[in-house]
Amino acid sequence: MRAIVITAQGGPEVLEYVERPDPEPGDGEIVVDVAASGVNFIDIYHRSGAYPLNLPSPIGSEGAGVVSAVGPDVSDVSVGDTVAWASVLGSYAEKAVVPADRVVPVPAGVPAEVAAAVMLQGMTAHYLTHSTYEVKPGDSVLVHAGAGGMGQLLIQLAKLRGATVHTTVSSEEKEKVARAAGADEVLRYDDFVDVLRNQVDVVYDGVGAATFDGGLAALRPRGLMALYGAASGPVPPVDPQRLNKEGSLFLTRPTLVNYIAEREELLWRASDLFGWIADGLLKINISQRYPLAEAGRAHEDLAARRTTGKLLLIP
Ligand SMILES: NC(=O)c1ccc[n+]([C@@H]2O[C@H](COP(=O)([O-])OP(=O)(O)OC[C@H]3O[C@@H](n4cnc5c(N)ncnc54)[C@H](OP(=O)(O)O)[C@@H]3O)[C@@H](O)[C@H]2O)c1
């Protein structure tokens, strides 16, 4: 089988497209013929060295496909099932080895590509709007980078929960995408603070360094900042006294693995998402598909903010 591996961390050129023996499932594992792998910022962090990895390493954190083999001690997954997963390394491959207790069944009404596109960002948008902060009808929500993969999902889930959604984007083209996702107000990075000062209940910030200060200023007293990423670079250390001065604010830096650690929670989030997709309440915007061999080009496009929506690698 073909797969992407890295033997050193660095630029997109360290992503090597190689031939490997077909994998065998170990205890509690399954092998999946991958239909599509999702491209995510965490893959860029793994590749670049921003996050540690034991080298050499497979790469890619999300995918979906059909089970081709099951190992010993696997009872509830069978050959031929369509399954999907997130936060399991090695998804940039024709065949992925995945622990059986980390996959979710994909219902008949959801294509495998859509399942691959929604697992990581969709479950993140789910925990951010349902658990980190439970968005309520009438809440005022600010979502940064509203045309992005995360942004379009957060806008839709916050609207489903009855909020008014403000968002930021960098261009007119991206403004159209954010409006199509349902945003009530679309702003630019240089004007959102003036428009929203002291007004919003929760800020969802995956942009980081460039937007963090403005986001704190946009929060009402006792509002919550969910800083969930760093597309523009990491936020420097924060003095807790700032949260006092700016109105008894809450600050959290959440990550998906802590919100899907229990199997029950993983199944809850994934089945909510699949249900909304099947009912037409959640639209998954797959904007670009790349051949698996061109993973480096996908990384470059995502990091250079040339994309909207979801990027997939097709083996
Ligand atoms: N904590 C978690 O559990 C978790 C899980 C999934 C993703 N994330 C985070 O969510 C964030 C978004 O991920 P995504 O995959 O959906 O990406 P994305 O939003 O599709 O792409 C990033 C977007 O950020 C905006 N941006 C603003 N300044 C930027 C800069 N200097 N460089 C690059 N982009 C910039 C761009 O939109 P504009 O051009 O409109 O500004 C760009 O398109 C990432 O930080 C990722 O790490 C976190």
Image (cartoon, rainbow, N blue to C red):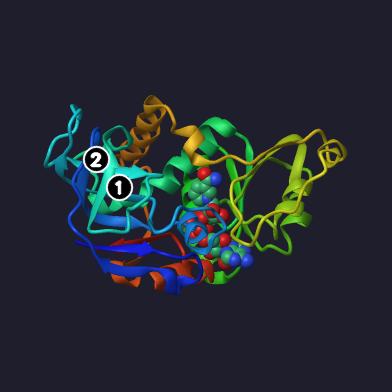
Circle 2 — which element?
loop
The answer to whether one can see residue 161 in this image is no
Is residue 239 toward the left or the right of residue 101 in the image?
A: right
> Residue furthest toward the left?
80
Please count the marks in the image. Answer: 2
Is residue 8 toward the left or the right of residue 16 in the image?
A: right
Is residue 263 toward the left or the right of residue 82 in the image?
A: right
The residue lying at 36 percent from left, 50 percent from top is: 62
Where does the image place residue 26, in percent across and percent down from the top left? Answer: 23, 39
Ligand 1 is located in which of the four quadrants?
bottom right
Question: Quarter holding the N terminus?
Answer: bottom left
| Residue hosting label 2 | 106
The amino acid type found where label 2 is placed reads Val
The answer to whether one can see residue 226 in this image is yes
The front one of 103 and 242 is 103
Q: Are marks 2 and 1 in contact (CB under 8 Å)?
A: yes
Where does the image place residue 142, in percent across and percent down from the top left? Answer: 63, 47
Indicate whether 114 appears above or below 293. Answer: above
Circle 1 — which element?
helix
The front one of 279 and 75 is 75
The amino acid type found where label 1 is placed reads Ala
The residue lying at 59 percent from left, 59 percent from top is: 231
Mark sitting earlier along the chain (2/1): 2
Where does the image place residue 2, in percent across and percent down from the top left? Answer: 23, 64
Question: Quarter holding the C terminus?
Answer: bottom left
Q: CA distance from mark 2 to mark 1?
A: 7 Å
Where does the image place residue 146, in percent across and percent down from the top left? Answer: 55, 56
The front one of 170 and 26 is 26
Is residue 275 toward the left or the right of residue 141 in the image?
A: left
Q: Residues within 10 Å of mark 2 (few under 14, many from 20)?
A: many
| Residue hosting label 1 | 115
